[in-house]
Each structure stands twice: as C-alpha cells, then as structure tokens.
Amino acid sequence: MSFVQFSRLNLSFGERDILKDVSLRLAAGSRCSLTGANGSGKTTLLKIIAGIIKADSGERSIQKETRISYLPQSGIVHHGITLRDEAEKAFGFVHTLIERLEKTGEILEKTKSDSSSTKLLIEEHHLLQEQIEQSGYYRREGAITSVLRGLGFSLNDINRDTGEFSGGWQMRIALAKVLLEKPDILLLDEPTNYLDIEART
C-alpha cells in the first residue's frame, strides 16, 4: 500500500515555530481532515507532505512509486491552451510510464530467452502495462469530459481558452486535473471554497 510518513517535523520562520515535533502517516485509501485556526501551519504542512518545501528537521519516508498531488487554495492561473488540453496534462506522468515500457520492450527483444535477467524484465514490463491501464490513460477522453462536467463546465467550455475563465473557475480547472491524476495521496487545501453544492458532490 502506498504511504507517506513523517516523524518529528520542525519548521520555523524566523523566531516563530510554525511546526514543532509533528508526526503523521497517510496511506492510500484513508481519508483525513486537517483542522486548525488560520495561520496555524495547515498549508505549510500540506506543502511539506507534497514535497514543495522542506522542514528544518525531521524524517520523511515515502513508499517507492507513491504519487502525491496537491491542490493549493488559491493563486492558480491557466492560459494559452484549451480547457480540454489543460485537463489532458493530468496524464503527463503516464507518458513517462509509456517511455519506460517501450525501453523495457526494446531491451527484452535483445535479451536472450535463457538470460537470468529476462524474468525480471518481463515482470517490469507487465507491471508498467498494469500501471498504464489503471491510470485510465486509454479512457481519458471520457474521464476528462465526465470530471469537467461534474465540476460545472459545459460541453461548449471544453474548447475554450483557459485564460477566458475567472478565478473561481481557474481553481476548478486545477481541481479537475488533480482528480484526473488519480494519485495515491491527494492533498486538497480548502478545495470547496469555489464550489457550489452540486460541484462538491
């Protein structure tokens, strides 16, 4: 099971302690809520989990291949590309998997069948195929349309330039992308700020 774990995290801004001796573990499949007063360090902790900033001290452990997606609470702007193509970027990590799959296949073609490494290569090739399939990459068109419609975009919006959308809709675009990424760990910083009841559902 994919997980991320932190022990005794500490972070200070000047003389102010933002985080002190913080420990936590997040695993795929669990649901956690982080609550606290404004300025208590919630966003800072999420950024540390996402790997955007580093703590002053503490241990960070992430299981290999664990994918983490983070949605900030504001400040995201998209432009110069259609809504559909922006949503397509959510599958960018799959391109890396496809490249690895192709390289593994090329190596397999050159490897003798009785080689001791052949079995490992076959297993890696199979695992990469499974990861690509589970990502939804081959069904991405339907997924993109479904998620965008669920967040309130119309079919006419799909070919509009993302720069035409207002701030609240910009955040919905970002939310659509992290949902489409299907990460192992999904970190959402106040994601419902710009959503109506239907979009929240």
Image: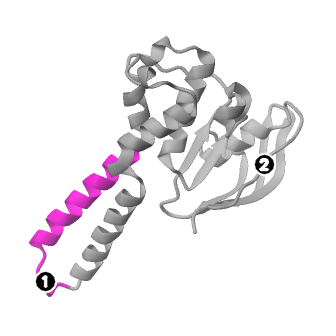
Residue 61: mark: none
Can you say whether 72 is above or below 35 in the image?
Answer: above
The residue labelled by disc 1 is 113
Going 14% across and 87% down the picture, which residue do you hit?
114
Can you say whether 184 is above or below 187 in the image?
Answer: below
Q: Is residue 117 visible?
A: no
Residue 93: % across, % down: 39, 47
Mark earlier in primary sequence (2, 1): 2
Front residue of 15 and 173: 173
Tell me where the magenta segment starts and ends, as one range. Answer: 91-115
Left or right of 143? Residue 27 is right
As for residue 116 lying within the magenta part, the answer is no
Whether tag 2 and tag 1 are in contact, CB under 8 A, the answer is no
The residue labelled by disc 2 is 33
Count of numbered marks: 2
Quarter holding residue 74: top right
Q: Considering the image in quadrants, where does the C terminus appear? A: top right
Q: Main secondary structure of the magenta part?
A: helix
Residue 21: % across, % down: 83, 54
Residue 111: % across, % down: 13, 75
As for residue 95 lying within the magenta part, the answer is yes
